[in-house]
Image: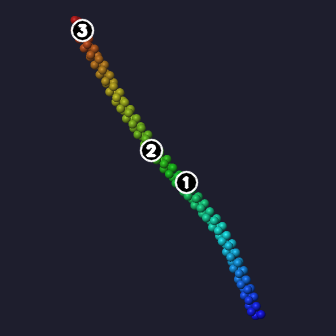
Amino acid sequence: MNSGNVSTAREALMAELLQDADVLVRRFEQADEALAGRIEKATTDAAGKAFLTARLNFESVIDKNADKLTDAGRHAAAQIGNQLNSGAAQMVAANAAFERKMWRFVLLLVLFALVAGTAGGFIGAKLAGA
């Protein structure tokens, strides 16, 4: 009987050991499930925060560059306006100079026509016998 008690004690110890191992496996599975859920939630939160940070940085870059682009456009428009005004002033000055030259030319033509008319009348009078 002694050997029967030993074998029963061994079986009892083995059964208890298997139960402890089974409890450890269940706890490990529960920890694994909980850890998987936490990892998934942490990954989702981190991705959301990274996306939000990237979006805010992108928007701030757009705002900064929009101001620079607007300033550059205003500067370019001012330069174009200055060049147009300068060109218009040159055209007005050239037009005024051309107008003075035109009046001189018209006066010269009138004087030439007067001289030609006088000379033609004098020659015509001489040919007519007067």
User: In the figure, residue 121 lies in which quadrant?
Assistant: top left
Of the residues under marks 1 and 3, which one precedes in the sequence?
1
Of the residues under marks 2 and 1, which one precedes in the sequence?
1
Secondary structure under tag 1 reads helix
Q: Residue furthest right?
A: 1
Give the residue pinned by disc 2.
76
Q: Is 10 rendered above or below residue 95?
A: below
Q: Amino acid at mark 3?
A: Ala
Residue drawn at (36%, 32%) of the image = 93
Q: Amino acid at mark 2?
A: Ala
Secondary structure under tag 3 reads helix
Q: Amino acid at mark 1?
A: Glu
Give the residue pinned by disc 3.
125
Residue 4: give x, y in percent of width and height. 76, 91
State the quadrant of the C terminus. Answer: top left
| Front residue (pair 50, 2) | 2
Give the residue pinned by disc 1.
59
User: In the figure, residue 99 lies in which quadrant?
Assistant: top left
Residue 39: give x, y in percent of width and height. 63, 67
Give the crowd class for mark 1: few <14, some 14-19, many >=20 residues within 10 Å: few
Of the residues under marks 2 and 3, which one precedes in the sequence?
2
